[in-house]
Image (tube, helix red, strand yellow):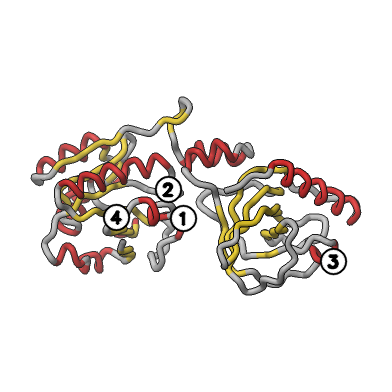
Amino acid sequence: MKIFSANGSKLSQLDFAQLLLSSAVALGSFSGMHIGHMALIKEMHAHARTHDLVSVVYMVNKSGKRTKKVPRFMIDGMLNEIKVDYVVVDDWQDIAHFSPEQFVYVRLQQTLRCAAAFCGENFRFGTQAAGDAAHLVELMGRIGGRGFVVPLVMLDGEVVSSTTIQRYLDESRLDKAFAMLGRSISINGKVVHGAGRGRKLGFPTANIPYSRNRFCLIFGVYHTIAILSDGRELPAITHLGLRPTVNDDGEVISETHILDFNERIYGQKLSVHFLEFIRSEQKFESIDDLKSAVNRDIAAAKARNCLL
């Protein structure tokens, strides 16, 4: 899979377009990549394979900053599950002025050589979101292509959406959120040196920088799985938050205590997968109260005995 992230003036450099190959394109925001997005992409990919088309996932960067690197969360899950040919990320400021007609003619027909466009039932496009799914089908017909509207995915009577997923995370219902995501939420990075407070308290932690995902977990303690650079998957608990008992600098910190583990892994890559919520973050009156709470957290994690 090739990831093409550039401003509009460089989209003409797409090699499949230069070779005059036609494409099937999945259109959407794809922020946070959930099972609804995956259903749309799978339909596009299947059509591309049976009609000898290049498969393209097209998404728009609305951050206000020019795209330099595609955020990992935007394509999470797609890399391993669906082998699409291209992911194309366009900058919103380059297409915000396009009418629905201009978007189809300029972006889909001229830039992407689109023969088949796929979107969800709630898809909107063009300036002021003037175009909808039915309009896309009509406009694709005008350029000699086809438009396909993929039904929204339902789970337990609810439409799968980013808003619903975030609500479940806010309610600490990780099982519901992860079912809609099709995976657990994880954070990844190299283990960095902290203040060493965890080790002094008898609970050594592996700290990795925390950068906010498309979906935000509430602050607290979680049962997690730590995947080391050598592939070992070990049960752990992770505190995500501000450490109000011992920290006053306002920095969000991710601290993972790997159960029954005392190896030094500074500088190594670590992947932490969140599985279950244990408790909310709280400020304790004393260090002894904090240690007692951590011991209870560890006991709770061992009792659950979850595996990834």
Q: CA distance from mark 1 to mark 4?
A: 16 Å
Nearest-to-viewer mark from 3 and 1: 3
Q: CA distance from mark 4 to mark 2?
A: 14 Å
Q: Would residue 56 be found to the left or right of residue 146 on screen? A: right
Mark 1 sits on what residue?
73
**Type of amino acid under label 3:** Lys
Quadrant of the frame with the N terminus: bottom left
- SS assignment at label 4: loop
Q: Which mark is residue 33?
A: 2
Q: Earlier in the sequence, mark 4 or mark 3?
A: 4
**Type of amino acid under label 2:** Met
Q: Earlier in the sequence, mark 2 or mark 1?
A: 2
- SS assignment at label 1: helix
Give the residue displayed 69% in from the left and 54% down from the top.
Answer: 236
Mark 3 sits on what residue?
200
Q: Earlier in the sequence, mark 3 or mark 1?
A: 1
Q: Which mark is residue 25?
A: none
**Type of amino acid under label 4:** Val
Give the residue displayed 19% in from the left and 50% down from the top.
Answer: 102
